[in-house]
Amino acid sequence: MSTPFEPVAGHAFMEMILAGPPEVVSTPQVTGDATVGQSLNCTMGVWVGMEVGSYEYHWQRDGAPIDHAPLVADYLLVDADVGALVNCVVIAQNALGLTAADPTNEVGPVGAAP
């Protein structure tokens, strides 16, 4: 004998999350020594939704994009960063779209190399 389908509380909500673009549930963070010649690392944070296919890390200096910075989790501090606050914005993408997390914490001001 079969029983009728009974939706589980919250089930429809979970299906919507799993079937949409990525959604950040834990903001990415930047860590590292804010000194020229050292690398900063940006975590990807925690995302939900259909499997994320890719992440891009957009590095910023004093809130503006850093020209020619690679779109990867590590950023090597250079002389142009001295005195600035550095952070990143992580963008996650899956087959259903892309989402940018809020900007990370700022690290700095960046100091000159010893």
Image (cartoon, grey):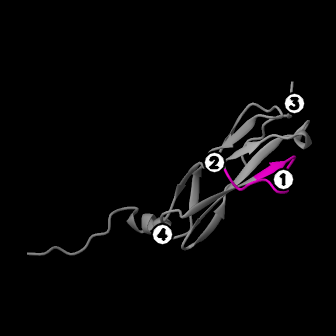
The residue indicated by pointer 3 is: 111
Badge 2 local density, few (<14 within 10 Å), some, or many (20+)?
Answer: some
The mark lying in front, picked from 4 and 2, is 2
Q: Disc 4 versus disc 2: distance between alpha carbons? A: 21 Å
The residue indicated by pointer 4 is: 16
Q: Disc 1 versus disc 4: distance between alpha carbons? A: 35 Å
Q: Which comes sooner in the sequence, label 1 or label 2?
A: 2
Q: Quadrant of the C terminus?
A: top right
The residue indicated by pointer 1 is: 66
Q: Position of residue 36 (x, y in %)?
A: 83, 34
- Magenta span: 59-72
Q: Disc 1 versus disc 2: distance between alpha carbons? A: 20 Å
The mark lying in front, picked from 2 and 3, is 3
Amino acid carrying mark 3 in the image = Gly
Amino acid carrying mark 1 in the image = Ile
Amino acid carrying mark 2 in the image = Thr
Q: Position of residue 4 (x, y in %)?
A: 21, 75
Name the side, left or right, on which 35 lies relative to 51.
right
Classified by dominant secondary structure, the portion drawn in magenta counts as: loop
